[in-house]
Amino acid sequence: MADAVARDLRMPAASRRVGRRPLVNRKSMVAFFFALPLILIVACLVVYPAFYSMHLATLNKSMTKFVGLGNFEFLFKRNTFWMVVEQSVLFAVTAVVFKAVIGFVVAHFVHNIPLKGQRKWRGMLLIPWVIPPAMSTLAFADVPSGLRASATTLSAMAQRNNPPRPGCRNHIRSPARRVQTVSFI
């Protein structure tokens, strides 16, 4: 499409400068002009909020006074912050590992499908890819609460008829185990 626009914008040969093409006739400039609205949208929706959030991070709680990096000093001294960082890293690493392994297995199956019923099998194998990552985000949103977490609720429902034996711990009560469980799901 950029070629067609550049071709239509060409000026007659008599008015062209020798050795240099006009700026608008260059394919790269036409492509840039086509991408300019997207660049502006990204700048408005991503870059501006990023810089604004950095500005807000340097203000006090009531957002009236500049405190610099004091907020970060306060966070880095708290154990809760480091526990959240640890859980986030654990979730990210386990999710990437599980997704990579499952992806390689599914790719192997898709590659080695017999010709008969190939479309049906490929469709079934692509279902996990079609389900949006938002589902795992929703499942992970309740993990820190412990009581409302999806896996904890399912575990409690399953144990109503089978109460836990004395001394037997529910693996979902540990925050690290909850993150691993949701990552696996």
Image (cartoon, helix red, strand yellow):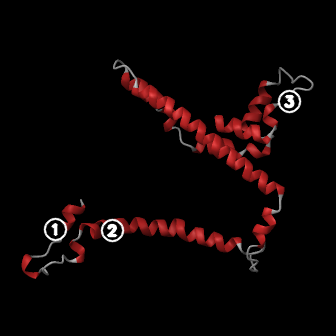
Q: Position of residue 103 (x, y in %)?
A: 51, 34
**Residue drawn 50% across the image and 37% down it:** 129
Is tag 2's residue or tag 1's residue first in the polypeptide sequence?
A: 1
The residue furthest left is 14
Q: For the residue carrying disc 1, how many other residues have a C-alpha within 10 Å: few (<14), some (14-19), or many (20+)?
A: few
Dot 1 falls on a residue whose secondary structure is helix
Q: Is residue 2 left or right of residue 115?
A: left
The residue pinned by badge 1 equals: 8
> Residue 127 placed where, x, y %?
49, 32
Q: Which residue is mark 3?
A: 169
Q: Quadrant of residue 95?
A: top right
At label 3, counting other C-alpha atoms closer than 10 Å, the crowd grade (few under 14, some 14-19, many 20 or more) is few
Q: Is residue 149 visible?
A: no
Residue with the mark numbered 2: 32
In x, y percent, where is residue 38? Answer: 41, 64
**Residue 75 image offset from top left, x and y in percent:** 79, 63
Residue 19, by quadrant, is bottom left
Screen quadrant of the N terminus: bottom left
Q: Amino acid at mark 2?
A: Phe
Q: Amino acid at mark 1?
A: Asp
Mark 2, other Cα within 10 Å: few <14 / some 14–19 / many ≥20: some
Under circle 2, the secondary element is: helix
